[in-house]
Image (cartoon, grey):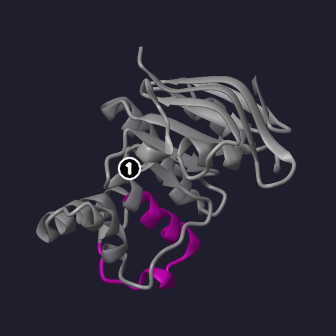
Amino acid sequence: MTRVYSVSDLVFSYDGPVVLEVEHLEILQGEVVALVGPNGAGKTSLLHLLAFLQDPDRGSMLFCGETVTRKRILSFRRRVGLLLQVPYLFHSSVLDNVMWGLRIRHVPRPECRRMATAALERVGLSGFEHRPARSLSGGETQRVALARALVLEPEVFLLDEPGSHMDRESVLRTEEIVLRLNRDQGTTIVFTTHDQAQAQALGHRVLRLSQGRLASA
């Protein structure tokens, strides 16, 4: 089976103490991997590295068999979707927020609207298209961000603490979407969580981070 990520001897710090030391990590195509651990364990840092938003201090990373370099980072980044704990929405309509990634990829506007409308329906926000995005509740904001990520049809979908700022309905819908993405499209999923029950329910494999080091949970 294809290795989506292959990481070796990775070290990462924020211009100070080391926050991650990952000797070896492989994530296979079609896997759902849960990362669990306490605050400060390095879960979000690892997710940002997998999304190619940060560079490791040292170590190697392969993505789908290709070495990750700064020269090719944008092409890799576009193949990965990321849902942050506290997503940023632009001061525009819900529809414009969801269309944003499509427009910078030069998708024709009529197609942008069709795809964005379908993504909003998928996350249970039909009828929200013309609402100001910054007026939404926390759970609705998370679902708009989810639609914005899903509409780009990423090969890999990374979620940072899905549910930490969501109401129960939004959590259940997000979990359902994640499972369907994986089952129907074979999308590789990596998510962080404090919820061991959620990790066991959704993940094919659960990894624990403690003080920046990985171990099987």
* Residue closest to the eye, 131 or 11: 11
Residue, x 55% and y 48% (percent of image)? 159
Quarter of the image for the N terminus: give it: top left
Q: Position of residue 77 (x, y in %)?
A: 44, 48
Q: Inspect the magenta stretch and tell me whether residue 185 lies in it.
A: no
**SS class, disc 1:** loop
Of the residues shown, which amino acid type is indicated by label 1? Arg
In this view, 53 is above or below 29: below
Extreme-front residue of the structure: 71
Q: Quadrant of the C terminus?
A: top right
State how many labels appear.
1
- Residue for point 38% across, 84% down: 92
Residue 128 in sight from this viewpoint: no
Q: Position of residue 18 (x, y in %)?
A: 83, 44
- Image position of 145 (left or right of 139): left
Above or below 144: residue 64: above
Q: Residue furthest top?
A: 1
> Can residue 42 be seen in this snapshot?
yes
Measuring from the top left, give residue 127's x and y in whole percent: 30, 75
| Magenta stretch: helix, strand or loop mostly | helix
Label 1 Cα crowd, 10 Å radius (few <14 / some 14-19 / many 20+)? some
Residue 6 location, x and y as percent? Answer: 55, 24
Work out whether residue 1 or residue 132 is closer to the camera in this orientation and state it: 1
Residues drawn in magenta: 127-147
Residue 128 in magenta stretch: yes
Q: Which residue is mark 1?
A: 78
Q: Residue at x 52, y 59 (%)?
A: 170
Q: Residue at x 86, y 38 (%)?
A: 211
